Amino acid sequence: MTAITLPHYLVVSAALFSLGMLGILTRRNAVNVLMGVELVLNSANLNLVAFSRFGPGNLNGQLFAVFVIVIAAAEVAVALAIVLTLYRLRRTPNLDEADILKG
Amino acid sequence: MPIGAVVFWILALVTVGSAAVVVLSRSLIYSAFALLFTFFGVAGLYVLLGADFLAATQLLIYVGGILVLLLFGVMLTHRIYDLDLRSEVTQPLAGWLIAVGLFASLTAIAVQTPWAAGAPRSPAPTTRTIGEMFMGPFLLPFEAASILLLVALMGAAMIVRRKKDA
Protein backbone atom coordinates (compact mmCIF):
# COMPACT_ATOMS: atom_id res chain seq x y z
CA MET A 1 0.00 0.00 0.00
CA THR A 2 1.46 3.30 -1.07
CA ALA A 3 1.49 6.52 0.92
CA ILE A 4 -1.53 8.81 0.84
CA THR A 5 -1.11 11.47 -1.83
CA LEU A 6 -3.22 14.13 -3.52
CA PRO A 7 -5.31 11.81 -5.77
CA HIS A 8 -6.57 9.88 -2.75
CA TYR A 9 -8.15 13.00 -1.33
CA LEU A 10 -9.46 14.01 -4.76
CA VAL A 11 -11.22 10.65 -5.16
CA VAL A 12 -12.86 10.95 -1.73
CA SER A 13 -13.95 14.45 -2.68
CA ALA A 14 -15.31 13.20 -6.02
CA ALA A 15 -17.34 10.56 -4.19
CA LEU A 16 -18.77 13.19 -1.85
CA PHE A 17 -19.60 15.44 -4.80
CA SER A 18 -21.33 12.67 -6.76
CA LEU A 19 -23.36 11.58 -3.74
CA GLY A 20 -24.42 15.15 -3.09
CA MET A 21 -25.39 15.58 -6.72
CA LEU A 22 -27.40 12.34 -6.52
CA GLY A 23 -29.24 13.72 -3.49
CA ILE A 24 -29.97 17.01 -5.23
CA LEU A 25 -31.27 15.28 -8.35
CA THR A 26 -33.35 12.47 -6.88
CA ARG A 27 -34.89 13.79 -3.67
CA ARG A 28 -38.30 15.44 -3.52
CA ASN A 29 -38.01 16.84 -0.01
CA ALA A 30 -36.45 20.31 -0.02
CA VAL A 31 -34.52 19.76 3.24
CA ASN A 32 -33.00 16.61 1.80
CA VAL A 33 -31.94 18.53 -1.29
CA LEU A 34 -30.25 21.06 1.01
CA MET A 35 -28.32 18.20 2.64
CA GLY A 36 -27.06 17.28 -0.82
CA VAL A 37 -25.93 20.86 -1.37
CA GLU A 38 -23.99 20.71 1.89
CA LEU A 39 -22.25 17.53 0.73
CA VAL A 40 -21.22 19.24 -2.53
CA LEU A 41 -19.85 22.27 -0.65
CA ASN A 42 -17.91 19.98 1.70
CA SER A 43 -16.35 18.17 -1.24
CA ALA A 44 -15.25 21.49 -2.74
CA ASN A 45 -13.70 22.44 0.60
CA LEU A 46 -11.88 19.12 0.81
CA ASN A 47 -10.42 19.74 -2.65
CA LEU A 48 -9.27 23.24 -1.71
CA VAL A 49 -7.57 22.08 1.48
CA ALA A 50 -5.92 19.12 -0.25
CA PHE A 51 -4.50 21.33 -3.01
CA SER A 52 -3.35 23.81 -0.37
CA ARG A 53 -1.51 21.03 1.45
CA PHE A 54 0.21 19.41 -1.52
CA GLY A 55 0.59 22.50 -3.67
CA PRO A 56 2.69 25.63 -3.29
CA GLY A 57 3.68 26.65 0.17
CA ASN A 58 0.94 29.07 1.13
CA LEU A 59 -2.44 28.83 2.80
CA ASN A 60 -4.62 30.44 0.11
CA GLY A 61 -6.62 27.23 -0.33
CA GLN A 62 -7.54 27.07 3.34
CA LEU A 63 -8.55 30.74 3.22
CA PHE A 64 -10.89 30.03 0.29
CA ALA A 65 -12.36 27.14 2.28
CA VAL A 66 -13.19 29.55 5.13
CA PHE A 67 -15.07 31.75 2.67
CA VAL A 68 -16.93 28.72 1.31
CA ILE A 69 -18.02 27.84 4.86
CA VAL A 70 -19.27 31.42 5.39
CA ILE A 71 -21.27 31.32 2.18
CA ALA A 72 -22.65 27.87 3.04
CA ALA A 73 -23.93 29.23 6.36
CA ALA A 74 -25.62 32.18 4.64
CA GLU A 75 -27.04 29.88 1.96
CA VAL A 76 -28.60 27.40 4.35
CA ALA A 77 -30.20 30.17 6.43
CA VAL A 78 -31.88 31.81 3.42
CA ALA A 79 -32.79 28.48 1.83
CA LEU A 80 -34.47 27.23 5.01
CA ALA A 81 -36.41 30.50 5.25
CA ILE A 82 -37.67 29.90 1.72
CA VAL A 83 -38.54 26.26 2.51
CA LEU A 84 -40.49 27.32 5.62
CA THR A 85 -42.40 29.94 3.64
CA LEU A 86 -43.16 27.38 0.94
CA TYR A 87 -44.41 24.96 3.57
CA ARG A 88 -46.64 27.64 5.08
CA LEU A 89 -48.02 28.48 1.64
CA ARG A 90 -48.50 25.01 0.15
CA ARG A 91 -48.47 22.66 3.18
CA THR A 92 -45.81 20.53 1.53
CA PRO A 93 -42.01 20.30 1.71
CA ASN A 94 -41.80 18.66 -1.72
CA LEU A 95 -40.16 20.67 -4.44
CA ASP A 96 -42.13 19.28 -7.38
CA GLU A 97 -45.42 20.44 -5.82
CA ALA A 98 -44.23 24.06 -5.79
CA ASP A 99 -45.59 24.69 -9.27
CA ILE A 100 -47.59 27.88 -8.74
CA LEU A 101 -45.79 29.59 -11.59
CA LYS A 102 -46.65 26.84 -14.07
CA GLY A 103 -49.28 28.06 -16.52
CA MET B 1 1.02 0.30 6.15
CA PRO B 2 1.89 3.55 7.96
CA ILE B 3 -0.45 4.77 10.65
CA GLY B 4 -1.39 7.88 8.64
CA ALA B 5 -2.67 5.74 5.77
CA VAL B 6 -4.77 3.62 8.13
CA VAL B 7 -6.34 6.74 9.62
CA PHE B 8 -6.99 8.13 6.15
CA TRP B 9 -8.78 5.01 4.97
CA ILE B 10 -10.93 4.86 8.11
CA LEU B 11 -11.88 8.53 7.78
CA ALA B 12 -12.58 8.19 4.06
CA LEU B 13 -14.78 5.15 4.73
CA VAL B 14 -16.73 6.98 7.46
CA THR B 15 -17.15 10.09 5.31
CA VAL B 16 -18.27 8.41 2.11
CA GLY B 17 -20.32 5.74 3.88
CA SER B 18 -22.32 8.19 5.94
CA ALA B 19 -22.71 10.47 2.91
CA ALA B 20 -24.26 7.49 1.12
CA VAL B 21 -26.65 7.04 4.06
CA VAL B 22 -27.55 10.75 3.83
CA VAL B 23 -28.50 10.39 0.20
CA LEU B 24 -30.02 6.91 0.16
CA SER B 25 -31.86 6.70 3.49
CA ARG B 26 -35.61 7.03 3.30
CA SER B 27 -35.94 8.64 6.71
CA LEU B 28 -35.12 12.33 7.02
CA ILE B 29 -33.94 11.92 10.62
CA TYR B 30 -31.50 9.18 9.63
CA SER B 31 -30.22 11.44 6.85
CA ALA B 32 -29.64 14.32 9.27
CA PHE B 33 -27.75 12.16 11.76
CA ALA B 34 -25.65 10.54 9.03
CA LEU B 35 -24.77 14.07 7.90
CA LEU B 36 -23.28 14.56 11.39
CA PHE B 37 -20.82 11.72 10.79
CA THR B 38 -19.98 13.03 7.33
CA PHE B 39 -19.05 16.41 8.83
CA PHE B 40 -16.94 14.72 11.51
CA GLY B 41 -15.17 12.63 8.85
CA VAL B 42 -14.40 15.69 6.75
CA ALA B 43 -13.08 17.46 9.86
CA GLY B 44 -10.82 14.48 10.51
CA LEU B 45 -9.53 14.67 6.95
CA TYR B 46 -8.79 18.36 7.53
CA VAL B 47 -6.71 17.39 10.56
CA LEU B 48 -4.82 14.85 8.44
CA LEU B 49 -4.18 17.61 5.90
CA GLY B 50 -2.70 19.86 8.59
CA ALA B 51 -5.59 22.35 8.61
CA ASP B 52 -6.24 22.63 12.32
CA PHE B 53 -8.12 25.93 12.22
CA LEU B 54 -10.40 24.71 9.44
CA ALA B 55 -11.16 21.48 11.29
CA ALA B 56 -12.30 23.45 14.34
CA THR B 57 -14.30 25.81 12.13
CA GLN B 58 -15.92 22.85 10.40
CA LEU B 59 -17.05 21.40 13.71
CA LEU B 60 -18.28 24.73 15.07
CA ILE B 61 -20.18 25.96 12.03
CA TYR B 62 -21.30 22.81 10.25
CA VAL B 63 -22.10 20.62 13.24
CA GLY B 64 -23.08 23.41 15.60
CA GLY B 65 -24.91 25.64 13.16
CA ILE B 66 -25.87 24.21 9.80
CA LEU B 67 -26.84 20.75 11.02
CA VAL B 68 -29.03 22.20 13.79
CA LEU B 69 -30.66 24.50 11.24
CA LEU B 70 -31.35 21.53 8.96
CA LEU B 71 -32.89 19.62 11.87
CA PHE B 72 -35.10 22.63 12.58
CA GLY B 73 -36.08 22.54 8.91
CA VAL B 74 -37.00 18.86 9.18
CA MET B 75 -39.09 19.43 12.30
CA LEU B 76 -40.85 22.56 11.11
CA THR B 77 -41.87 21.28 7.70
CA HIS B 78 -43.67 18.24 9.03
CA ARG B 79 -46.60 17.89 11.32
CA ILE B 80 -45.32 16.97 14.73
CA TYR B 81 -47.41 13.79 14.97
CA ASP B 82 -46.17 12.68 11.59
CA LEU B 83 -43.83 10.01 12.88
CA ASP B 84 -42.35 8.59 9.73
CA LEU B 85 -40.68 11.50 8.00
CA ARG B 86 -40.31 10.08 4.54
CA SER B 87 -38.65 11.59 1.53
CA GLU B 88 -39.67 10.10 -1.78
CA VAL B 89 -37.32 9.63 -4.68
CA THR B 90 -37.96 11.21 -8.06
CA GLN B 91 -36.30 10.66 -11.45
CA PRO B 92 -34.00 7.93 -10.07
CA LEU B 93 -32.63 6.68 -13.40
CA ALA B 94 -31.38 10.03 -14.68
CA GLY B 95 -30.02 10.95 -11.26
CA TRP B 96 -28.03 7.74 -10.92
CA LEU B 97 -26.71 8.04 -14.49
CA ILE B 98 -25.48 11.59 -13.90
CA ALA B 99 -23.98 10.81 -10.48
CA VAL B 100 -22.14 7.69 -11.66
CA GLY B 101 -20.90 9.47 -14.78
CA LEU B 102 -19.68 12.40 -12.69
CA PHE B 103 -17.86 10.12 -10.27
CA ALA B 104 -16.23 8.13 -13.08
CA SER B 105 -15.02 11.19 -14.96
CA LEU B 106 -13.83 13.04 -11.85
CA THR B 107 -11.96 9.97 -10.62
CA ALA B 108 -10.34 9.51 -14.04
CA ILE B 109 -9.22 13.15 -13.99
CA ALA B 110 -7.88 12.90 -10.43
CA VAL B 111 -5.93 9.72 -11.11
CA GLN B 112 -4.60 10.39 -14.60
CA THR B 113 -3.55 14.03 -14.32
CA PRO B 114 0.16 14.38 -13.48
CA TRP B 115 -0.31 16.80 -10.59
CA ALA B 116 2.66 19.04 -9.91
CA ALA B 117 2.43 18.04 -6.27
CA GLY B 118 5.56 18.27 -4.23
CA ALA B 119 6.16 16.60 -0.94
CA PRO B 120 3.62 17.72 1.63
CA ARG B 121 4.82 20.34 4.07
CA SER B 122 5.27 19.34 7.65
CA PRO B 123 2.18 20.29 9.62
CA ALA B 124 2.43 23.58 11.46
CA PRO B 125 -0.15 25.70 13.29
CA THR B 126 -2.15 27.65 10.72
CA THR B 127 -4.35 29.92 12.82
CA ARG B 128 -1.86 32.78 13.12
CA THR B 129 -1.10 32.81 9.39
CA ILE B 130 -4.77 32.68 8.43
CA GLY B 131 -5.57 35.53 10.79
CA GLU B 132 -2.76 37.67 9.42
CA MET B 133 -3.89 36.97 5.85
CA PHE B 134 -7.46 38.00 6.74
CA MET B 135 -6.24 41.25 8.24
CA GLY B 136 -3.76 41.86 5.42
CA PRO B 137 -4.14 40.99 1.73
CA PHE B 138 -7.64 39.48 2.13
CA LEU B 139 -9.21 42.31 4.11
CA LEU B 140 -11.68 43.32 1.38
CA PRO B 141 -13.18 39.82 0.85
CA PHE B 142 -13.30 39.45 4.63
CA GLU B 143 -15.41 42.58 4.98
CA ALA B 144 -17.56 41.57 2.01
CA ALA B 145 -18.23 38.23 3.70
CA SER B 146 -19.31 40.00 6.87
CA ILE B 147 -21.75 42.16 4.90
CA LEU B 148 -23.03 39.04 3.12
CA LEU B 149 -23.72 37.41 6.48
CA LEU B 150 -25.58 40.49 7.70
CA VAL B 151 -27.68 40.62 4.53
CA ALA B 152 -28.43 36.88 4.75
CA LEU B 153 -29.51 37.28 8.38
CA MET B 154 -31.87 40.12 7.60
CA GLY B 155 -33.13 38.43 4.44
CA ALA B 156 -33.91 35.17 6.22
CA ALA B 157 -35.79 37.04 8.96
CA MET B 158 -37.74 39.03 6.36
CA ILE B 159 -38.70 35.98 4.30
CA VAL B 160 -40.10 33.91 7.17
CA ARG B 161 -41.88 36.84 8.82
CA ARG B 162 -45.61 36.31 9.13
CA LYS B 163 -47.38 39.16 7.42
CA LYS B 164 -50.24 40.41 9.56
CA ASP B 165 -52.26 42.02 6.78
CA ALA B 166 -51.67 39.46 4.05
Image (cartoon, coloured by chain):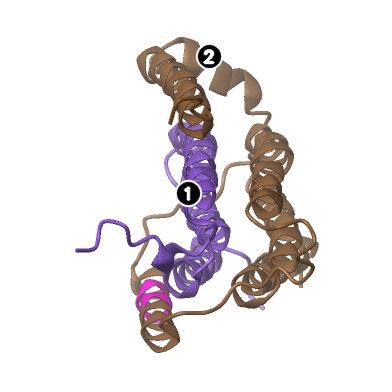
Chain colours: A purple, B brown
Q: Categorize mark 1 by other alpha carbons within 10 Å: few (<14), some (14-19), many (20+).
A: few
Q: Which mark is residue A89?
A: 1
- In the image, farthest residue toward the front: B165
Comparing B19 with B7, the one in front is B19
Magenta segment, prevailing SS (helix, strand or loop): helix
User: Across the whole image, how many numbered discs are drawn on residues?
Assistant: 2
- Amino acid under label 2? Glu
Q: Is residue B103 shown above or below A71?
A: below
- For the record, the magenta segment spans B102-106
Q: Secondary structure at mark 1?
A: helix
Q: Categorize mark 2 by other alpha carbons within 10 Å: few (<14), some (14-19), many (20+).
A: few
Q: Is residue B136 shown above or below A65?
A: above
The residue wearing badge 2 is: B132
Dividing the picture into quarters, in which one does residue B62 lie? top right
Comparing B151 with A54, the one in front is B151
Comparing A42 with A72, the one in front is A72
Q: Secondary structure at mark 2?
A: helix
Residue A96 x %, y %: 40, 68
Alpha carbons under labels 2 and 1: distance apart:
47 Å
The C terminus of chain A, quarter of image: bottom left
Image-based side of B113 in relation to B24, left or right: left
Residue name at image x 51 percent, y 59 percent? A30
- Amino acid under label 1? Leu
Write down the chain letter for disc 1.
A
Write down the chain letter for disc 2.
B
Q: Is residue A53 shown above or below B145?
A: below
